[in-house]
Amino acid sequence: MSWFNSSIAFVIIYMVVLFCVLPIGVKTPDEAGQAKLPGQADSAPVNPRLGFKFLLTFAISCVLFGIYYVVGYYDLLGLNELLGRGL
């Protein structure tokens, strides 16, 4: 697996995990008991904690990419034999 393929796989994993992590812990002003600003959307989060979510996403993505890399490197699924590229 080349570095380019690995980096593309990491970016895809990162983006999927990011969209799964973003809604965690989000509270609207109504749920938090705060007043909305004029023109603010009803669904706008009070404190989105984006830095924490980016770091959490990076950590989860590293673990998932590590699993992906080990499975691909050691051919744990037997895809080489399935695709006819056996040794």
Image (tube, grey):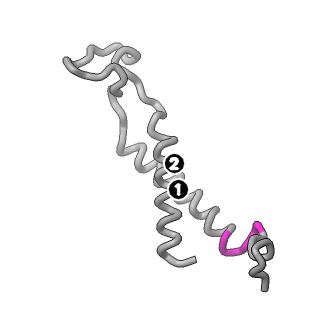
Q: Amino acid at mark 2?
A: Val
Determine the secondary structure under disc 2.
helix
Q: Residue 63: horizontal and vertical position, in percent? A: 57, 58
From the image, give the main secondary structure of the stretch colored magenta: loop
Q: Amino acid at mark 1?
A: Ile
Disc 2 packing (10 Å; few <14; some 14–19; many ≥20): some
Q: Nearer the viewer, residue 14 or 49?
A: 14
Question: How far is disc 1 from disc 2 in space, using C-alphas?
Answer: 6 Å
Q: Residue 47: horizontal and vertical position, in percent? A: 34, 30
The verdict on residue 13 being magenta is no
Label at residue 13: 1
Q: What range of the chain is rendered magenta?
A: 72-77
Q: Is residue 32 above or below residue 63?
A: above
Residue indicated by mark 2: 17
Q: Give the position of the C terminus as an image quadrant.
A: bottom right
Residue farthest along the left direction in this orientation: 38
Is 1 placed left or right of 23 in the picture? right
Picture quarter containing residue 86? bottom right
Q: Residue 73: horizontal and vertical position, in percent? A: 66, 74
Disc 1 packing (10 Å; few <14; some 14–19; many ≥20): some
In contact (CB < 8 Å): disc 1 and disc 2: yes
The residue drawn where x is 80% and y is 76% is: 81
Q: Give the position of the N terminus as an image quadrant.
A: bottom right
Q: Nearer the viewer, residue 17 or 80?
A: 80
The residue drawn where x is 25% and y is 22% is: 40
The residue drawn where x is 61% and y is 68% is: 69
